[in-house]
Image: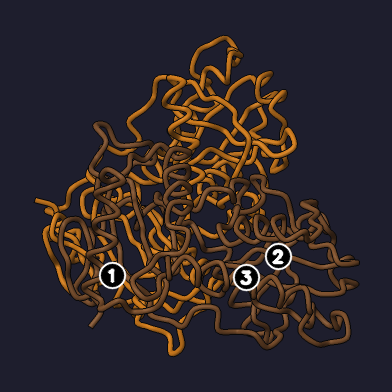
Chain colours: A orange, B brown
Amino acid sequence: MSICYVNGRYLPLAHASVNVQDRGYQFADGIYEVIAVKNGQLWDEEWHLDRLERSLAEVQIAMPCTRPALKHIIRQVIQQNCNVEGGLYLQVSRGVASRDFAFPKPAPKPSLVVYIMPRRLGQSTKGVRVITIPDMRWKRCDIKSIALLAPVLGKQQAKEAGAFEAWQYVDGIITEGTSSNAWIVKNNTIITHPASPAILNGITRMRLLALAKENGIAIEERPFTVAEAHDADEAFASASTMVVVPIIKIDDAVIGNGNVGALTMRLRGLYEEAFKKLITD
Amino acid sequence: MSICYVNGRYLPLAHASVNVQDRGYQFADGIYEVIAVKNGQLWDEEWHLDRLERSLAEVQIAMPCTRPALKHIIRQVIQQNCNVEGGLYLQVSRGVASRDFAFPKPAPKPSLVVYIMPRRLGQSTKGVRVITIPDMRWKRCDIKSIALLAPVLGKQQAKEAGAFEAWQYVDGIITEGTSSNAWIVKNNTIITHPASPAILNGITRMRLLALAKENGIAIEERPFTVAEAHDADEAFASASTMVVVPIIKIDDAVIGNGNVGALTMRLRGLYEEAFKKLITD
């Protein structure tokens, strides 16, 4: 039975509830994070909490508690769920108030929900297919908000096309996947959209860039087109729980020789090595 | 004490809750309507329910029950709230499921919430000020979804500027307000953005267009610029509970002679007359 922290209580997930006037429910007025957790260890927790604080600040929601208190709650949730492997889901909304678009005054207490989505981390190593779709989202994708209807519709479109993910594009430029960052490899250089309001700056994205730099792998953080993606030598997606997923087909274009890319697997290996080290430290 | 319908039960609003895994809470995966209600009568109920069904169909959420059953629930809520005047709030989400971007399979039962936000309808007849801001929203504003974080931030920006509302623009074209449609009057013609994915086709907007047509008032449904708005003879906002709100200043530009516009008040009068008729029928 999954245990969920919700506004001061630890409850079975099925009984964890929030008021219908929670602004997360009526206005998507909230922020979330998903942190990979395994053997009781969190991957890049500080970076995730830094990003949480940044997103909250961008929409002027206060932290629901101090960072040490939040880390304590996170650890309680991990312990109460018997160190299950998965994605630790953390959501903060502006709280409960009578419905009105502007921020309530005085500010209500922000709502906090923390639980674990059990899943095996980084499980897809065989190549997958992605499709490309127009990016329908708002103009502040750098804020990790719960206003996720556009990505929901995009991911569903991918699923119906028999694909793993949908890469979104604006004016022919790939921004990112619906729940992952998008990468291509050309001439042994890894290429990904620069951090900007057009994408979420993924924690796994940042970690992979750091690892590539440390290991002398050439990087270009620059916009790339759908046509460049179709013509890439390799391609992959990154996100916290999927880690690095090799892509062998984009729309109908076979990528490289149709096999999982060597540089892709090297990066995945470097990431796994980094976190094995973290866990054994 | 306000009574709220939530998934089969009528409860005090403060005790009406939904599960934290409701997709409305985690993904803004839901649709809403606000219907003006007074003396137990709903204004343009059928048009609102038509739009609800259309929005739900666009995101492939099933109606939570048949339309007659929904109308019965709405009437129960009105009766249990002693015919209070206000905005009847109705929200449907895709329901509760383990968190995953794509639609859950099999589809969960959609969640339904109905309650009344008590307020006096159409209360602002003195002129107000609006500001103009960049439109940050997604590309399907014709769907009345609960993914409202961009409008929340826009309305807050208006409030902090001491304004009533913010009119959003794309490439210099005014689309609409954060929770109302935008109108200007020039040379006795009322001008408003055409229905398109860039705006929500307001029910009050549609009703006002019908009343203008019936009463021989010239209409142009066409895009208009921020500069045109600044130079307008009159301006107003429309929405279900605010009805018609005269605007006398846009940014720093005084509209017309700085007084509430005559055609604006004529339209407001026609609307009030139409609904007085409806109520006494």
Please report whichever mark, 2 or 1, sits nearer to the chain's N-terminal start: 1
- Mark closer to the chain start, 3 or 2: 3
Does residue A170 appear in the picture of this structure? yes
Q: What is the CA distance from the residue labelled 1 to the residue labelled 3?
A: 31 Å
Query: What amino acid is labelled 1 in the image?
Result: Ile
Residue shown at the point (43%, 81%) measured from the top left: B119
Dot 2 lies on which element? strand
Check chain identity for marks 3 and 2: say if they share one: yes
Pointer 2: what residue?
A: B182
Circle nearer the N terminus (1, 3): 1
Mark number, residue A69: none
Comparing A158 with B224, the one in front is B224
The subunit carrying tag 1 is: B
Whether residue B279 is situated above or below residue A126 in the rendered picture: below
Query: Element type at marker 3?
Result: helix
Chain bearing mark 3: B
Residue corresponding to mark 1: B78
Find the residue positioned furthest to the left: A1
**Residue named by callout 3:** B154
**C-alpha span from label 3 to label 2:** 14 Å
Amino acid under disc 2:
Ala
Q: Where is residue B64 drawn, in percent x and y?
A: 28, 46
Check the image and report above or below for B143 versus B82: above
Question: Taking A204 as reference, is A115 left or right?
Answer: left
Mark 3 vs mark 2: in front: 2
- Residue A21 image point, x, y percent: 33, 71
